[in-house]
Image (tube, grey):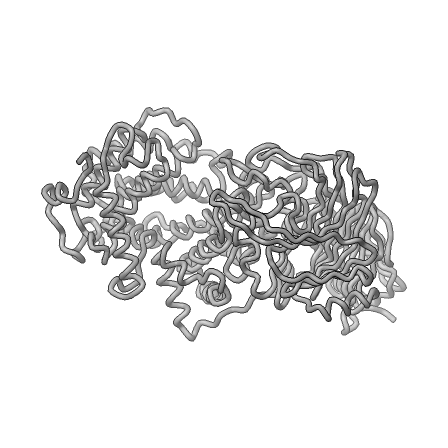
Amino acid sequence: MNGYSRRIFLQLSGVATAGALIPGHAAPAGDDPFALLRRRWRDVTAGSGFDPAAEPYLTRLAGLGAAAAGYRDAMAPTGASLWPDLAFPSFTGTPARLRTMARAYALPGTGLTGDVGLAAAVATGVDHYRRHVYAAGADPAGNWWDWQIGAPKKLLDAAVLIGPHLAERQSRALRDAVDHFLPECRLDDYSGTSTGANRVDLCTVTLLRAVLGSDPGKAALAASALSPVFPYVHEGDGLYRDGSFLQHTSVPYQGGYGAVLLSGLATLFAVLRGSPWEITDPARQIVLDAVERSFAPVVHDGFCMDLVSGRGIGRQPYGDHRRGREIASSILLLGEAASAAERTRWQAMVKGWALRNTCKPMLKAAEGSDLGFHARLAAILDDDAIPAADEPTGHRLMAMSARAVHRRPGWCAGLSMASYRIGHYEYGNGENLRGWHTGSGMLYWWGEGHGDQYSDAFWATVDPYRLPGTTVSTRRLADGAGEEWGDTCPPGRWVGGATDGTYATVGQHLNGFGSTMEAFKSWFFLDDAVVCLGAGITGGDGVPVETIVDNRRTDAPLTVDGTEGWAHLEGHGGYVLPCARLRTLREERTGGPDPVTRGYVTLWLDHGVDPASAGYVYLLLPGASLAETRARAADPGWARVLANTARRQGVQVPSLGITAVNFWNDGAVGGLAASAPCAVLVRERADGTATLTVSDPRRELSGLTVTWDRPVAEVLHGHPLLTGAETGSGLTLAFGRLADRGGGSQTVTVRLGR
């Protein structure tokens, strides 16, 4: 046998009794700050706060021990591998197994707790991998991330967990290798691949390198180099004031790199708390604010919406639920560094997510991934003093990432668009090769009980040319068409809209991906409906252009009344389509590496081959019954279309007091006029007041004048950018420079006249 058998390890080192004090992990002695960091690292990352003799921890820890024993016994070091089934370089698998073994050594209840033979195996494995793959001077071929973050983070993690069982010679060699691939100068400039989540990971590796070598200088560097991550950015990677988070310059990424950033910062805040290197930068409050500003808006009932997950959307079924758990875990951990008020709100929010997520119950799923999170979550679920926060209502428009999220009682919608600064889609490393049209106005929506609508093999089986809400040329595209890493931005600048926090008007000047197609698309987000308009739809690719009203992964019955202009999908909702010939298809589609089959109901509008200025109007009614759908179709005055052209698109909803217009050009419609392209949302209230909300989606106006043909007595609440106002028989508002407001909404409140 070529492997390192259990017998050999026992002969080498003897057996430590289960539950014995683990060398290197006793309470810190004297004033050694690195003893504190080692203990904190173990507690925060490997898990703590649970009774190892209680379920489910008893079983999960025993399973961890069994896995570690299996890896130990199967080790067979050669020049080409450490385990026969993982040929070098094995950047992911080999370091991950070593870390699993180290965690079984460090955690109680594994059956191998404090087993010095297991620790010796980890030390041998780490040094072997360091000599054959991760050696100072080796050629860092392939993806830089593997050499600077992926492999060293796991190797250092394992090394720190086994403490003095890694000999000084082995420790020095590993530290030298890390210094070679990740020199300190890598943290000098906040640019390139050393930004956002990548910078947090690089700092984490630097801190682990410092802990392994008890190096105060590197610990100080790891802490100080985080500071550029905190401030809001105006372009490129990072957090934006409107809640957006971008990575790879042009990809909305709260569900991927953003979740990594949040997790990494929560970990570092917790590990460094009380040490000489505690994170005290005042700008760290921006990270705490991001919980409710950037992350909570894209989490619905415990899952993270795919519209902010880049190329990772199709990695695994229910990946959106896994990402939601990761964000929830980070929020609870970050709460330990937050104020009492923030911590209270966050615990209530996460508790609500966990209780509403019935597709993939959060507490059960945490058993197999993060015992520390499981313990924290179980504690708040069992605490009757912590209320479960309801799903909020309202609208969040993240203009800087071309994303919108609308929440009303019983349903939620998310919209993903592309612009001159946000890519149509991201692919890379062979992932998301057919996500071409996810930025073409994809409208996700969830009703009650629909938490798995886009989770259960959706991306493996859906028709990529018929994503819900999109307008697309049916021209066939190659897998991975366009540039990698999200560099697929179209030229359109008018992408965004205006919101008063409850309702919204959102628009996209769409340039089709990989085609000549062009369209002007608008969405008006209301109480029980989304009014969808399209205009100026043109194309010259010699193929049909389609607008996908919806594409639901379901076998539910579909009822269509072409005469009255409506359709209803049982258990889902309704659609009202005046003056449109709806096309429908029920099909089963098969896909994925392990092929699965799912049923779909597709509804679409065919604009024909090479259309010239085609258009559409339809209402989406999430959760509506058949009777409610029929009634809305019989009431054409409920939502009046004021304009639907390539110059302006607007609606009026009298019952809500709403008039909303997307001005693609200057002009007038429905009593509103604008001096330049903009979005305007007016909302009249029963108390005799009204709000006018405007925005500059193109981010280029030095001034804007909006007039409203409605008697107004006075301006009650202005806005810092409001430079002039005239009231009387009509209202004229003059705004200053809107170009610097990131497409954000500016609201003015007035008292109506008679």
- Residues 680 and 530: in front is 530
Residue 726 in the image: state x and y as whole percent.
Answer: 84, 59
Q: Quadrant of residue 487?
A: top right
Q: Residue at x 23, y 33 (%)?
A: 77
Decide if residue 606 is on the left or right side of residue 134.
right
Above or below residue 511? Residue 525 is below
Residue 746 in the image: state x and y as whole percent.
Answer: 71, 55
Decide if residue 109 is on the left or right side of residue 153.
left
Q: Quadrant of residue 211?
A: top left
- Residues 228 and 640: in front is 640
Residue 679 in the image: state x and y as whole percent.
Answer: 76, 52
Decide if residue 9 is on the left or right side of residue 45.
left
Residue 16 in the image: state x and y as whole percent.
Answer: 13, 52
Q: Residue furthest right?
A: 729
Q: Residue at x 82, y 61 (%)?
A: 563
| Quadrant location of the C terminus in the rendered image | bottom right
- Residues 737 and 152: in front is 152
Q: How many marks?
A: 0
Residue 240 visible from this viewpoint: no
| Quadrant location of the N terminus in the rendered image | top left
Above or below residue 542? Residue 747 is below
Residue 628 visible from this viewpoint: yes
